[in-house]
Amino acid sequence: MPTTTTESIYTNLITALEDRGLRKTAARAAVTSRIETTGKAFTAEQLCIDLPQVGRATVYRTIRHLVDAGALCKLQILDGAPMYSIARVEHHHHKICSRCGAVGEFQHSTVERVMRSLEKEIDGDIIGHRMEIFITCSQCIADSRTGESSVG
Amino acid sequence: MPTTTTESIYTNLITALEDRGLRKTAARAAVTSRIETTGKAFTAEQLCIDLPQVGRATVYRTIRHLVDAGALCKLQILDGAPMYSIARVEHHHHKICSRCGAVGEFQHSTVERVMRSLEKEIDGDIIGHRMEIFITCSQCIADSRTGESSVG
DNA sequence: ATGCTAATTGATATCAAGTATCAATACTGA
DNA sequence: TCAGTATTGATACTTGATATCAATTAGCAT
Ligand SMILES: [Zn+2]
Ligand SMILES: [Zn+2]
Ligand SMILES: [Zn+2]
Ligand SMILES: [Zn+2]
C-alpha cells in the first residue's frame, strides 16, 4: 500500500514488509536498499546481478512480497521479463518510454470517470483496469537529436 | 491488420500471412483453422496440445507472424503465458474476465479523446497506449450463483 | 510435368524466467 | 537460555520460448 509520506522509499518499502508481519532481515534490507538507490524500474534478474550476495530465491520472494503489499508495480511490457517500479500513489497508470524504459506514474480523473461510466455498458462486473501510455521521453528525443543514447 | 470484412476468421488470418509474403502451408492452415474453431483467447501451449501433428516451433512461429501482422492481439494477463485473441477491429482495448479468461474487445471514443488531450501534458512524444478492463463476466456471475463453473 | 531454389518444417538442444525443496541459519518470545 | 518459527540460499526442477539445422515442400520457370 503506497503512502504519500515524506519518508524515504527505503523506509516505505521496509514498512510495507513489516506491515505484513514479515521480519526485517539483512537480505530484505539489501534488496530494498538497492531498489531505492537504483531509482528506476528494474527486472528481477537485474536485482540478482546487482546483489550477488543475496540468493536468487530471496530476491524473487522479496519482490513478490513488495508487489503483494502494493509497494511495487509489476509491469508487463512487451516481451521479456516483467519490470517493477515503485508505487508512489494509490491508483495510477504508467507512462513508459519505449526507447529507454523509463517508467513514470500518472493519474487522470477523466480516465477514472470513463471507467465508472462503463459500469453500465459492460456485460458483467468491473473489477479494475490497467492502462499504459507508451512514449518517447524528452530525454530520448534530445539524445536522438545529438546522436547519443541513454540506454544501457 | 484486421479487416472488417464478412470473410471467415480463417480466411482473414491466412490472408494476413500471405500479405506478408508468407507461403500457405498445411501447418499454417492447421494452426489458423484451430484458432478459428477455438473461437476464444488461447495460449501457445494450448495450441501445441491441440495440434500434436504440428511442431512446437511452427506453432510459435505462426503465432508470431499473426501478431506481427496485427491479426492477433498478444495479451499479457497476470502471471503465466501470454494469451492471444483475434483482432477484429483496428484499434481497441480488451475486457478480460478474471474468472474464466474470456476476452472481449471494446472501443471507447472518450478514452481516445483523453489520450489525444494528454499529448500536451506528457513530457515526450506519445507512441500509443494500451488498456485492459478486468471484469467478472455475466456468465461467471450466473455460474457462481448456481455453484457451477465454466472454467476449464 | 519437371526440376530448381528458397522457404518451411520439426526434432532436438538450448536458453531464460521463475518456483519447489529442504537443510542450515537467524530471530523471537517465554 | 532455549524451543519454535521464519528466513535463507544452493540446487534441482518447471515452464515458456527460441536456436540449430538437415530434411521436406511450395512456388515458380521452364
Ligand atoms: Zn526515455
Ligand atoms: Zn485508473
Ligand atoms: Zn467469465
Ligand atoms: Zn485506445
Image (cartoon, coloured by chain):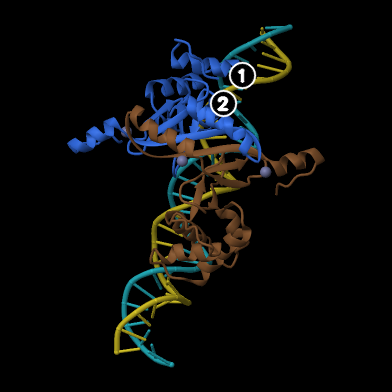
Chain colours: A blue, B brown, C cyan, D yellow
Question: Where is A105 relative to D30, above or below?
Answer: above
Q: Are marks 1 and 2 on the same chain?
A: yes
Chain at numbered mark 2: A
Residue type, numbered disc 1: Arg
At mark 2, the secondary structure is helix
Q: Which residue is mark 1?
A: A20
- CB contact under 8 Å: marks 1 and 2: yes
Bin the neighbour count of mark 1 within 10 Å (Cα to Cα): few under 14, some 14-19, many 20 and up.
few
B80 and A113: which one is in front?
A: A113
**Left or right position of C11 against B22:** right
**Mark 1–mark 2 distance (CA, rounded to whole Å):** 9 Å
Q: Amino acid at mark 2?
A: His
Q: Which mark is residue A65?
A: 2
Disc 2 under 8 Å from ligand 2? The reply is no
Query: In the picture, which quadrant includes the C terminus of chain A?
Result: top left
Image coordinates for residue A64, horizontal then vertical, percent: 55, 29
